[in-house]
Image (spheres, rainbow, N blue to C red):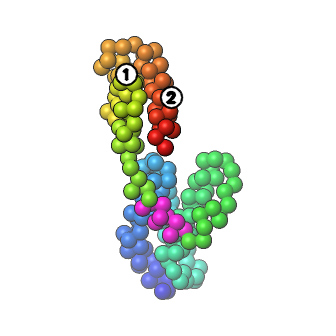
Amino acid sequence: MNLDEQKFNLSKIYDDQFDRIYSFFYYKTLSKDTAEDLTSETFLTLANILAGGKGHEIENIKAFLFGIARNTFIKYLQHKYKAEIPFSVFGENFEEYMDTFTKESKKAIPFEDRLIKYLEHIPKKQAVILQLRFIEKLSLTEICQRLGKNMNYVKTTQKRAFKSLKDAIETTL
């Protein structure tokens, strides 16, 4: 594929690969904003490389794109953790790693469903706090108002609920 064909196919590559790359970044970062930024950076880098051209042809543009995605993610991790991360951490085939990780993440049981399973194994007062906090997504202030309790009660009960939940999970494993 010559350079002009690669530039022309950029929008097709974007349409074909956007969801895969965005999903991978989203499941790795758990942030829509970060996933959007990393995905944009990946495609922008590809566009800049194709625009700069310099007469180089890319034999497998899809593999090249996944190489850019891998490098973008490693740079993100290095910046986030202020540490060097080896390129080999994802193995030889980044596309395969990305697909496997994304499929496993989509199959994972949601946190709320896993939590409900264990609520019956902890004291009722604690279970109520965790249900309001993590299933109904209420803030501590909203929980205080709903239960008619003070903040100290809610925080203490939540802390005890975490310990009880940890114990319940360990005994069922």
168 vs 10, nearest the viewer: 168
Q: Tell whether label 1 touches label 2 (CB within 8 Å).
A: no
The disc label shown at residue 163, or none: 2
Amino acid of disc 1:
Lys
Q: Which residues are magenta?
A: 94-103
Q: Quadrant of residue 12?
A: bottom left
* Distance CA(mark 2)–CA(mark 1): 13 Å
Q: Position of residue 33 (x, y in %)?
A: 44, 48
The disc label shown at residue 95, or none: none
Residue 84 vertical position relative to residue 7 in the rendered view, above or below: above
Query: Which residue corresponds to mark 1?
Result: 125
User: Is 89 positioned to the left or the right of 34 in the image?
Assistant: right
38 vs 94, nearest the viewer: 94
- The answer to if 25 sits in the magenta stretch is no
Residue 40 vertical position relative to residue 7 in the rendered view, above or below: above
SS type, badge 1? helix
Q: Is residue 45 visible in this depiction of the protein? A: no
Amino acid of disc 2:
Lys
101 vs 11, nearest the viewer: 101
